[in-house]
Image (spheres, coloured by chain):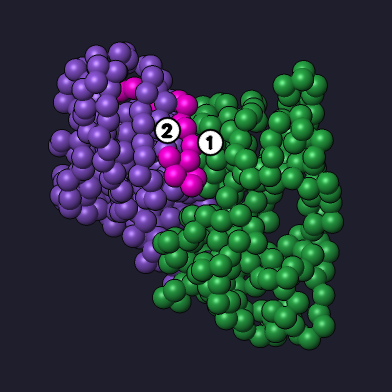
Chain colours: A purple, B green
């Protein structure tokens, strides 16, 4: 049994986003700052679902900016209900709105919800993934699909990709030092001219490697 | 907010212990079976604390055997209370009793309890670690120290150590394949004539690498 006293810490964890910055020396000897971030469970919402959950024509309310320009944590949250009526409240919505709704959970979250077969996908690739019930202040959405564990990935712009000598779809390695040191072997490369160099991992991955204790990080092909 | 509906899944997780077996080919070309296990949060109890928690002279009740011979999950559980009165119930006790009580949590558990600085230690090395309040059916123990995150480690006997060419205190690497593939770089080697070859990781580590999805595991120096 997990008591109500845990509620606040769970809420804190939802909005937690740890950013660690490391000076990264690339193959050409040039240095660039590598930022590694932990994404707690969250969702992206489409216009249609926003209308149902928060009312017709409602808009997301800016709460704080995220690292990638234009992205933000909204003040709005929903409750997500999984199989066998297990639920997590205060699932944060990240803006701006997208073409399709999507829920991103760590394995630990998914197990808590009773989803034991959550697929590992890149954002946007949701065909055939599990659904869930979403409850907002104005209505309920039955999400047919879109619940994923986001694959660990690195955002970068084309110049940074040239530095690392990687192309879209490549995998890189991310070595985390320290007492729980490990190397992520399948870091998906996402390249966009608007991106800033950073790695996104989820809370399971961050807790496994003790990201908050780490003083040493290395990204390599 | 995490509802009471989650309780059952949390209890299930407490007693979860996933064992995966892999045929491991060592340097000499001989094969041995490598078993990798996930340890959910649990505690070990000393005679003195057992007396307080479950009554003078009480004994642990065998529930099911663990992989290492002589070790077992007991039917007894306690409630652990962390800083700011956060708690987790149904913390499973593993037997047999030990000389000193010790609580082993994943980072996720520790954060839920409000312990944000849980040290990563080998079992038994608890000097200077945080304490907690333990509540049993017959009494309450104020554990002065002993709350740790167990460092990932591998048990083996001397013959297996000779195969791997490792000594006590060495670190090995454990590569997990699959979509969340990663390599643990600091797997502590523990050698004992009574041990059977197996790796112990915690639930954060198992969830980060998707251990239950893995078909490929490699232990190497």
Q: Is residue B112 above or below residue A182?
A: below
Percent position (x, y) of residue A104? 39, 40
Q: Picture coordinates of residue B45 (x, y %)? A: 70, 71
Q: Which residue is disc 2 drawn over? A: A175
Q: A156 left or right of A119?
A: left
In the rendered structure, find residue B185 and report the number of the disc placed on it.
1
Q: Is residue A27 magenta?
A: no
Residue drawn 21% across the image and 29% down it: A32
Q: Chain of mark 1?
A: B
Kindly check if marks 1 and 2 are in contact, taking CB atoms under 8 A apart as contact.
Answer: yes
Q: Nearer the viewer, residue A73 or B148?
A: B148
Left or right of B63 in this view: A169: left
Q: Is residue A189 magenta?
A: yes
Image x and y of residue B1, in percent? 41, 63
| Magenta segment | A177-192
Which type of secondary structure does the marked residue at label 1 adopt? strand
SS majority, magenta: strand
């Amino acid at each position: 049994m997990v008591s109500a006293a845990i509620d606040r810490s769970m809420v804190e964890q939802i909005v937690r986003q740890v950013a660690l910055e490391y000076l990264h020396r690339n193959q050409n000897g040039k240095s660039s700052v590598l930022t590694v971030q932990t994404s707690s469970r969250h969702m992206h919402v489409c216009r249609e679902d926003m209308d149902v959950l928060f009312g017709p024509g409602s808009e997301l309310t800016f709460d704080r900016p995220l690292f990638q320009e234009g992205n933000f944590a909204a003040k709005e949250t929903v409750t997500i209900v999984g199989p066998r009526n297990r639920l997590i409240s205060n699932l944060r919505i990240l803006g701006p709105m997208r073409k399709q709704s999507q829920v991103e959970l760590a394995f630990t979250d998914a197990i808590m919800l009773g989803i034991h077969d959550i697929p590992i996908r890149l954002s946007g690739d949701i065909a055939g993934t599990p659904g869930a019930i979403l409850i907002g202040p104005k209505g309920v959405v039955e999400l047919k699909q879109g619940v994923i564990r986001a694959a660990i990935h690195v955002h970068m712009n084309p110049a940074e990709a040239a530095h690392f000598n990687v192309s879209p779809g490549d995998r890189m390695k991310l070595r985390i030092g320290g007492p729980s040191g490990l190397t992520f072997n399948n870091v998906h490369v996402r390249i966009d001219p608007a991106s800033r160099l950073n790695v996104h991992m989820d809370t399971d991955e961050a807790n496994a490697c003790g990201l908050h204790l780490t003083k040493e990080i290395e990204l390599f092909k």
